Amino acid sequence: MKYLILLLTLTATSPNAESYPQTDVVLLGELHDNPHHHTTQAEWVSGLAPKALVFEMFSNEAAKGVSADIRHDKAAMLAQLNWWGRASEDAEMYWPIVEAAPDAKLYGALLDRPAMQAAMKTGIAETFGADAAAYGLDTTLPETEQTAREADQLAAHCDAMPAEMLPVLVSLQRLRDAALARAVARAIDETGGPVAVITGNGHARKDRGLPVYLARVKPDLTVFALGQVEDGRSAEGTFDQVVSAPVTEREDPCLAFKKD
């Protein structure tokens, strides 16, 4: 199952076919609202020709409902996958990625709002299920790492999040990482790989994201992580390759935290 990792210097977006990393798992990070990042992901998926595609953005139940008769029907697919639990024009940015691997089996790793609410009440291990210990969700993080993660969450929420919520946000991030890792493990077991994963940079980073949890249950897998940034900015976290794209126009996310 193992493939040789090719740590080559790749072009900014689309390597030559023979230069793509030949690994068991390729993580294709993104900023969710940047269409250039989705174009890059579609190019990589086309070149990688994975046997499975794992998406952060829809549930595995939704993926199971993708029948052969709607596999290439854009409107039907977007409706079935119900991206992030809501109808959204942004979902169309992901369609070329699905089309780039027409024979790949689809997997989803989205944990819906009820699951997140349950995790906040009963804990992430209970929400994750019987194999929580295998993925390390029954343990606490080292103090230094916990502190660093809470600082990152505070910055990500425009320094406006109450202090008591920061440990909760860190735990939920761990839960999402583990859920993605479980989906990848399932995809490997069922298809043999290679597997391409479409997810945000925070989940793709190798020092803290899903690779940490995947290594606990599938230690022999080789994993390549691509991070994507805007305008040459530095990537937060550890990646095998980082590429840049033009910045996309967006409202200031901190406006949501400002009171009138």
Image: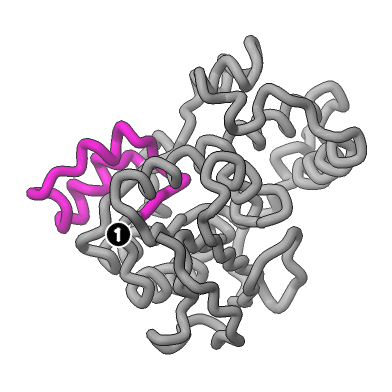
Evaluate whether residue 159 shows in this view: no
> Residue drawn 65% across and 51% down?
202
Above or below, 197 against 228 in this view is above
Name the side, left or right, on which 88 lies relative to 254: left
Residues 16 and 3: in front is: 3
Neighbor class of circle 1 (other Cα within 10 Å; few <14, some 14-19, many 20+) is many
> Residue drawn 91% across and 40% down?
144
Q: Quadrant of residue 108?
A: top left
Q: How is the image coloured?
A: one colour
The residue tagged 1 is: 51
Q: Position of residue 258 (x, y in %)?
A: 78, 38
Instruction: Locate the C terminus by quadrant.
Output: top right
Magenta-span inclusion, residue 77: yes
Residues 55 and 86: in front is: 55
Evaluate whether residue 58 shows in this view: yes
Q: Secondary structure at mark 1?
A: loop
- Specify start and end residues of the magenta stretch as a single range: 53-82
Name the side, left or right, on which 160 lies relative to 138: right
Instruction: Locate the N terminus by quadrant.
Output: bottom left
Q: Quadrant of residue 122?
A: top right
> Residue drawn 52% across and 46% down?
218
Q: Quadrant of residue 87?
A: top left
Q: Position of residue 157 (x, y in %)?
A: 76, 41
Above or below, 37 against 156 in this view is below
Q: Position of residue 216 (x, y in %)?
A: 60, 41
Residues 127 and 133: in front is: 133
> Residue drawn 13% across and 49% down?
70
Residues 126 and 151: in front is: 126
Magenta-span inclusion, residue 182: no
